Image (spheres, grey):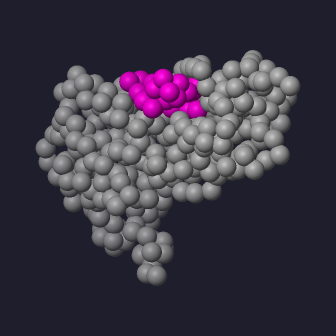
Amino acid sequence: MSENRSGAVGKPPTMADVARHLGISRQLVSIVMRDAPGASEETRTRVREAARELGFAPHTGARTLRQTRSWTLGVLFVPAHAAEHEIVEAIYPLAAKHGYDVVLSALTDTRGLEASVEELVGHRCAALLLIGAPLEEGLMARLVDRVLVPVVSVGSGARNGDYDVIRSAGDEGMRAAVEHLVSLGHEEIAFVTLDSMPDGPLRRRGYESAVRDLGREVDLVTVPGDYRDDDYFEEAGAAAGLALLERPRLPTAVLVPNDSAAIGLLLTLARNGVRVPQDVSLVGFDDNPMSRLSAIDLTTSRQDPEMLARAAVDVAVRRIEAEPGTVRRTGELVVPTTFIARSSSAEPRRG
């Protein structure tokens, strides 16, 4: 492996590396790279020389943003995720109210995060909204450093110093589900773990906290696999269903942190003669369009796509239109979920 001048093996240098090299703030390096007011000529010279020495270079498309004002928001989304289409749809009119156009870039199995972001930067987007993107820490840090525009992660993520996060209260949605099932009389509530999903660990922690607070035993059904798309989630739910069927007896209720996985589990149980909710109550999370079909009618926690979209657009526009040279302080905004009880959950069968 090669080693760059910043000391990082096999990784391109970042603005943070330049800042550490000079003993100055990352924000000051960003000001210089954007040609924004707020830095002396001496500092600009030092930063540019250090960037050349370390081999740091921002995206070529990002450099053009210094020359003319852009009125375009770049939106990255995963077409295979049914729940995200509603967020994308809501972004268009909200962006238009602020005078911005929208450019879409799709993240697929054959097209990675860097290529998708590169396309948006090539369109000279003034900010990037990443919906449901996998947030590998190192990769995201490098992208944020190189694009030189505000980045907002929508729908998943945790508080981060490099980019803004707009997410749903997944832990509270799981707590509402547990409380609903306990109110129906359920004592044995299993949870399907999907920790490779961006918000999976947060939703699992919400379940664990709620069942312990209510004096129940945590019952985790672990499903191995990588987070990819809704097809994977259905397969993961099916695998969880088979794992449950191998037990000496079924729990009276199962909580799944994703609707597509919950549907996969429901179909597997049905094929093996287990009725929902007569034999097992089932609760998901997302309220995707399939969950609302009368044949499914899944109890779930709804993420509010319009609230997520509105918050993301507002934050992006506020970052774009901030005074030049203003220190950018990123944050996290948590949007509440709404619990929806449907026919897939009922009182446990007695006897």
- Residues in magenta? 284-308
| Total numbered labels | 0
Q: Position of residue 328 (x, y in %)?
A: 39, 40
Check the picture and name the quadrant holding the C terminus. top right
Vertical side of 221 occupied by 20: above or below:
below
The furthest residue to the left: 68
Q: Nearer the viewer, residue 347 or 176?
A: 347
The furthest residue to the bottom: 1
Residue at x 36% of width, y 31% of height: 87
In magenta stretch: residue 351 = no
In magenta stretch: residue 303 = yes
Vertical side of 222 occupied by 204: above or below:
above
Q: Quadrant of residue 57?
A: bottom left
Q: Position of residue 329 (x, y in %)?
A: 44, 38
Q: Along the horizontal axis of the image, is 325 left or right of 266?
A: left
For the question of whether residue 266 can be seen, the reply is yes
Residue at x 72% of width, y 45% of height: 244
Q: Position of residue 14 (x, y in %)?
A: 40, 62
Q: Nearer the viewer, residue 288 or 198?
A: 288
For the question of whether residue 44 can be seen, the reply is no
Q: Position of residue 293 (x, y in %)?
A: 46, 26
Q: Quadrant of residue 37?
A: top left
Residue at x 38% of width, y 52% of height: 144
